[in-house]
Amino acid sequence: MADWLRYASTQQGVAQPSGGFFSTPRTRQPGPVTEVDGAIATDFFTVLSVGQNYTEDQWLNVQAFSMLRNWLLCYGAKGLKPPNSDDKSGMDRSVMSMVSTTSTSGRLLPPKDRLREKAFEYCQRLIEQSNRRPLKKDDGDLQKACLIEAVTIIDIICKQDSSYVYRSISFLKILHDRISGDATYARALLPIAQFFLNHAMPWCILLMQHILCVPPARSTALPTSEKATCDPAVKPTTCLEAFRHPQYKSMFQYLLRTKSAPEEAPERLIPLRQLLGSLASSPRVMQCAETVPVLLELFFRVVAEFADGRLINQLVVLLLQRSDQLYEIPAFKDDVYR
């Protein structure tokens, strides 16, 4: 299977004759496969490579990728060891393993490790291909589906061999930054979030917890990106006016931050919360309020499985502090408390 994934032909297949007694095979040599944007492929064949006809080993490549996730789950399910971010010696061993893996020919690895290595390379290649602009809409849909599958498979590989975590974090962060502003890639963000929940450092988990708790209030501020003029002497009556008002501007910046920061005093946010309360029935806010409890449940399920006692204690304290600051939607608060 590793060979099917990594060493399929990069030349298109020969077209079959249409049939008939007097038909003869085409003598024209097939050209190389292309990328979804029409460029000639310069790297190995994947399910996102494009051609008019495909060879037998290319079809095996596609079929191997279609079963790769389940194969890895069955083949490498025993002895999974998540990385311990507090164990420096474990991190050193992981880094050394990464170096030895990347500097050794894949053919010298044991079969299980070799399959993981080739699967990892394949998924990296798919992520690179997802950055290309497709010529056809169907190819764009296939890109997104393959991106979701590739990140999910990388997550599985990292659970089975922690040395891959340190090879994955940097390019998955880049991927997240690239697609996070594109609504058409919304589904692809979930497996990326799952990866960072499973494998990232404690500071990242704390930041994720903040991001999950804030969205209903955050989403009320999203429509305020338009420019507005306001008189500082006049108390704002709408979110749009408050967003430009000196008294509220720092509160909005705190609410919309993307990085961890010192926590604001709860009483400072009361005026802003009162102003945002009128948007509780907004469709955008309601949708966000329905989504957040589901994500929180997933978040704490992963934390309970992988986090150490110190991190859990930090999260419990943070959760208790935030529990009385939830956005005023009764059903949302009930779901979070539950």
Image (spheres, helix red, strand yellow):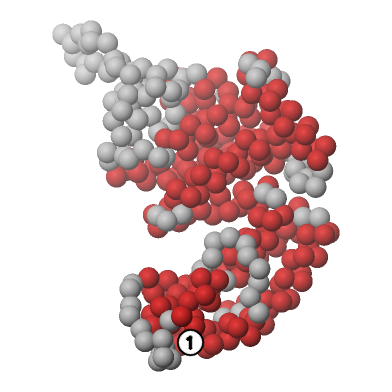
Q: Residue at x 27, y 38 (%)?
A: 135
Image position, residue 111 (x, y; %): 68, 22
Locate residue 232: give its quadrant: bottom left
Q: Residue at x 69, y 29 (%)?
A: 98
Task: Identify the secondary structure beneath mark 1.
Answer: helix
Image quadrant holding the N terminus, namely: top right
Q: Nearer the viewer, residue 123 or 227?
A: 227
Disc 1 packing (10 Å; few <14; some 14–19; many ≥20): some
Locate residue 105: give its quadrant: top right
Question: Which amino acid, mark 1?
Answer: Leu
Task: Left or right? Give the position of 200 relative to 146.
Answer: right
Image position, residue 196 (x, y; %): 63, 50
Query: Most extreme residue toward the front, as rendered?
Result: 233
Judge whether residue 52 can be spotted in this image.
yes
Q: Residue at x 52, y 22 (%)?
A: 6
Locate residue 15: give its quadrant: top left
Q: Nearer the viewer, residue 217 or 330?
A: 217
Task: Left or right? Give the position of 165 relative to 247.
Answer: right
Image position, residue 231 (x, y; %): 37, 87
Q: Dot 1 corresponds to which residue?
A: 275
Query: Most extreme residue toward the left, as rendered?
Result: 22
Query: Most extreme residue toward the bottom, as rendered?
Result: 234
Image position, residue 106 (x, y; %): 63, 19
Q: Nearer the viewer, residue 73 or 295?
A: 295
Task: Left or right? Give the position of 9 relative to 309.
Answer: left
Image quadrant holding the C terminus, namely: bottom right
Q: Residue at x 52, y 34 (%)?
A: 124
